[in-house]
Amino acid sequence: MCPYIHPGDRTVASIEKRNDPTGAIRYRVKIRIQGYPHQSATFDRLTDARKWAQSTETALREERYSKTSEATRHTLGDLVDRYLRDVLPTKPKSAGNQIAQLTWWKQQIGTYALADVTPFLLAEFRDRLIREPLPNHLKDAKEVGRHRGPATVNRYLAALSHAFTIAIKEWGWVEENPFRKVSKPKEPHSRVRFLSDEERTRLLAACQKSGNPDLYPAVVLALSTGARQMEIMTLRWSQVDLGRGLIVLEETKNGDRRALPLAGKALALMRERGNVRRTDTDLLFPGSDPKKPIHLRFPWEAALKAAHIENFHWHDLRHSAASYLAMNEASLAEIAEVLGHRRLQMVKRYSHLSVDHTAGVVARMNEKIFG
């Protein structure tokens, strides 16, 4: 083989003279430019090889063969549409919120080609997310006033960022994620609100008096196990082992399988419920449609009002369970195991509640080594 270097000020194209199996002379062209896909072709004539090398190199410089060309052919609206169609159905637990978040992005900058969706542009609309008043029908108790809080804005950013990640890894539409250069609003420290003994007594009494018979057992289950609301509402009898006092969650927020021990009041209530379970559904808490879980929003809010408990949400039942565990000498690792957190960082918010337990550990260690 005799190499020929393509003339020019940069040696990015090379031509090799080769013999094919019949003995005929062939010319193979290879073009390598950093940041572009490698190109190659074979010709019978050296003149044709040189012409192709020159024109292809020019085309690459103009990005006609680069991945960037995909980013010019597809808009952000195309990205959102394909993600909603192909990816979101595989994430049913987060679909509702992400549809709204991605639709917002499409409405704002859906006509932009992906090549033109820059960090500068995304930062501009990040700030708009923060500034713009919320429509009344989207306003909820988690928002600050009538505007989106930092946590909500970050969820909007994360939704579109993941769409870009899929477009890079699986579709080849873009080469890099512009969100890598977009700062996220700083979120306040995680809120820890748990029921005092008096509040818990009042709330459980109000739930027992509720006109909805599902409210009291659902709340007891949440306080006893630390399970999330959706985990409880979608529970099926096939997941419950009353003999062993155990609930097995096959699908959780972080994707791990998790076991919930049942004990005391919660176990007794589940056994009572098992004796009168409905025959038209496997759900523990079915709604009027036996295929769907019940919605407890209104009876829950009525119970909170009757118990005179303010600034408390259903998710705070999970915080309450974790706090009670900490105050009853459970270690952070044990709390993380019960709640299904992979990292201890997620449960350090409860560490101040286990000071007595930590002090006891230190005291026992000192007594052992110093006498």
Image (cartoon, rainbow, N blue to C red):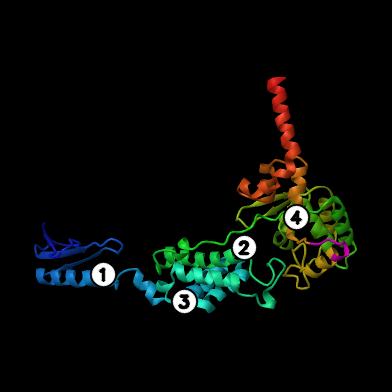
Q: Tag 1's secondary structure?
A: helix
Q: Quadrant of the C terminus?
A: top right
| Majority SS type along the magenta span | loop
Which residue was labeled with disc 1?
Answer: 61
Q: Residues within 10 Å of mark 1 (few under 14, many from 20)?
A: few
> Closer to the camera: disc 3 or disc 2?
2
Query: Gap between marks 1 and 2, in whole Å?
Result: 42 Å
Q: Give the mark count.
A: 4
Residue 317 can be seen, yes or no: yes
Does residue 81 appear to the left or right of 140 in the view shown?
Answer: left
Residue 280 sits in which quadrant? bottom right
Which residue was labeled with disc 3?
Answer: 78
- Residue 116 image offset from top left, x and y in percent: 41, 73
**Tag shown at residue 193:** 4
Foreground residue among 355 and 83: 355
- Mark 3 and mark 1 in contact? Answer it, CB < 8 Å: no
First-in-chain label (2 vs 4): 2
Q: Tag 4's secondary structure?
A: loop
Amino acid type at image mark 3: Asp
- Residue 112 image offset from top left, x and y in percent: 44, 77
**Tag shown at residue 38:** none
Amino acid type at image mark 1: Arg
- Residue 41 image offset from top left, x and y in percent: 20, 67
